[in-house]
Amino acid sequence: MNLRGAASATLLVVAATACGSGAGSDGEQAKTLTYWASNQAAGIELDRKILEPELAAFQKSTGIKVNLEVIPWSDLQTRILNAAASGRGPDVVNIGNTWSTSLQATGAFVEFDDATLAKVGGKGRFLASSMSSTGAPGLPPGSLPLYGMAYGLYYNKKRFAEAGIDEPPKTWQELVGTARKLTGGGRYGLTLLGASYTEGVHFAWMFGRQNGASVFDGEHPAFDTPEMVAGVKRYLDLIAVDKVVNPSDAEKTQDAQLYTDFASGKAAMMIMQNHGTAGLAAFDMDPDEYGVVPIPLPEDARQPVTSHVAGINITAFAESRNREGALKFIEFMTSPQEQTKLNKAFGSLPVVNGVTDPAFAAGHNKVFAEVLATAQPLPMIPQEAQFETLVGTAVKDLFAQVATGERVTESDIKAKLSEAGQKLLNGG
Amino acid sequence: MISKKRLPYLLLAPAVAAELVIHVVPMLAGLGMSLLKLTQFFLRDWTRAPFAGLGNFAVAVDVSAPVGADLLRSFCVTLLYAVLVVTGSWALGMLGAVLLRRPFPGRGALRALFLVPFALPVFTGVITWSFMLQRDTGLVNAVLDADAFWLIGGNSFASLVVVTIWRSWSFAFLTLTAGLAAVPPELHEAADVDGAGRWRRFRSVTLPQLAPVNRVLVLVLFLWTFNEFTTPYTLFGKVAPEEASVLSIHVYNASFSTWNLGLGSAMSVLLLLFLLLVSLGYLWLTSRRRRVPGV
């Protein structure tokens, strides 16, 4: 072997050794945890910045090092499903609370029976309303509440004043009228996350529910009822008929894109969950510069639903080789002290009793807390997650169609929603 | 003492073992999964999943129901996509290779430049394209002075084709450049003497001499494009627009949106069978043509 060959061979060996040195021994297992956090802040880097000091504090008190990965919403469900199927995943994971029953049905997660609950502070620690979205009724919860969230309508006070509008809209009809007044000259009345399938399904459910729809008939999908179709149409009409939303919103998947438009006044209103308050702060918008009200209901609403019980749950994989550590970590994350810190940073609401910080009962938080108190949970059945992806994708596709100028009729919407129901039946 | 008869098999054993682990076992696992009703309730313990027989395949090929109809449409989109990308990449690669055949100042720099798309990590290249193709802030609309959508709706297919050609023509260029270097210059000189023009020389000397290279290149490009996942996934995100929903993305979504990995596996097996048929047919056809004397 010549010199060059020897040198490159050495390099290869060194590289291979370096790459292979990641695995720890079994003794280290008890000292480390892997945690998949969902993206709550205005960017993944910001999530890390918020969580890392808390993880360091946890390590200081327990000696357990937490390896953090923050996962974007578009990937989270797939990643969790992959982990459940392969048995190779993190120890602790954040989930969308609406998925809790679907994920519980996989059997891949710890069951929080009374003995297990006792290790994380007991059942009494958590708010009853938040506990309503932790799994199927009658079974031990498959996850526990972490951050409480709800939808609201944000409005830019400066844009409202410029247009001579004194009050935020009180009904959906008023909202459309107000948004019309605020649209023009390259600026729009309202901004939406049109390419996000999760947003799509939330609006379909919320608006359908306001018309009196129930999405499932037992466990049988009822996605294409006239109430659902009318609900989805109202959402699409914001672009197609009312023309108060920028068609470009059909490409948007990141909250940050909405913050940019809202903070700059390019969009006068935005509909988002309470994490938007923290997001706007990251975009240098002062809480006094905007107002928040519940999403206005149509005048003839059959159900006064302006949000589902939104939020984030936390759970541990049953396969975790450090279950005790994982439970310790969940206990830590749901302690009143951490709940105060984290919910403040992420702009969400505490889900446990004993949080006394007045900040959560004042200002915008007060509005969101009231919405959450009257919110209804999405169906707590195993098919819920499929409902989210199938209907959400259908709504997203329809949104893209109207944005590109295609005409979408009620029968188009109905066909698309029936198809989603068919796929759920075929797949299950 | 190892007998002489056994030695070759022993020497082959590591390669066979690696092949088994990397290719054959996962393929068999996929085949096995496609026969199971592998829904969310059995994800953790596959052995408990009920046997579905050919049920998943029946759902996948039933084109009168939404699942099968979507799969068929996605198949047609993918076929068109693969044909356009292979044609485009091959034509551009050929043009580049022929133009850069004779030495001239700056040839090395141009060659290096042409290889950039192939050398860049896929994600880096494609995410840049996705920024360029955005409606409000994208470079493409700025240059065209338009407000068209490139990432959703009908144009999304064209975007996907162009971006993939940009990615893969470099490889065609590289392969054909190597192939051209092996064509004996005497053949061109002889054709020159016979009074052949540029086009005639290309058709009668270059193309036939490159036939073996082309045969492999076209097949490889086709298989790569047909299975391409990273480019559409990076360009469109998790859910591609219907117009550009190619099979790899479609199967991925079908598995994960209904949480039925058995159905997804059945679709993958169908895809595998199709590609196997295409490859075998193609090789049979091209090797038969080669034996015809005089060509």
Image (cartoon, coloured by chain):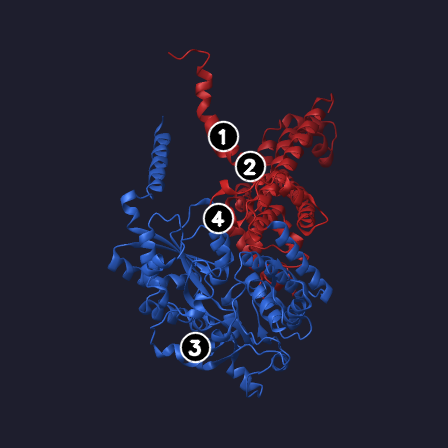
Chain colours: A blue, B red
Query: Which residue is found at the position 35% from the left and 37% from the top?
Result: A11
Q: Quadrant of the N terminus of chain A?
A: top left
Q: Secondary structure at mark 4?
A: helix
Residue underneath mark 2: B32
Q: Position of residue B133 (x, y in %)?
A: 60, 59
- The kind of residue tagged 4 is Asn
- The kind of residue tagged 2 is Gly
B292 vs A50: above or below? above
Q: Is residue B137 visible?
A: no
Q: Nearer the observer, disc 2 or disc 1?
A: 2
Residue underneath mark 4: A82
B113 vs B201: above or below? below
Is disc 1 in contact with disc 4, using a CB cutoff of under 8 Å?
Answer: no
Residue underneath mark 3: A365
Q: In 3D space, how far apart are the residues under numbered discs 3 and 1 (Cα atoms)? A: 59 Å
Residue underneath mark 1: B19
Same subunit under labels 3 and 1?
no
Q: Is residue A190 visible?
A: yes
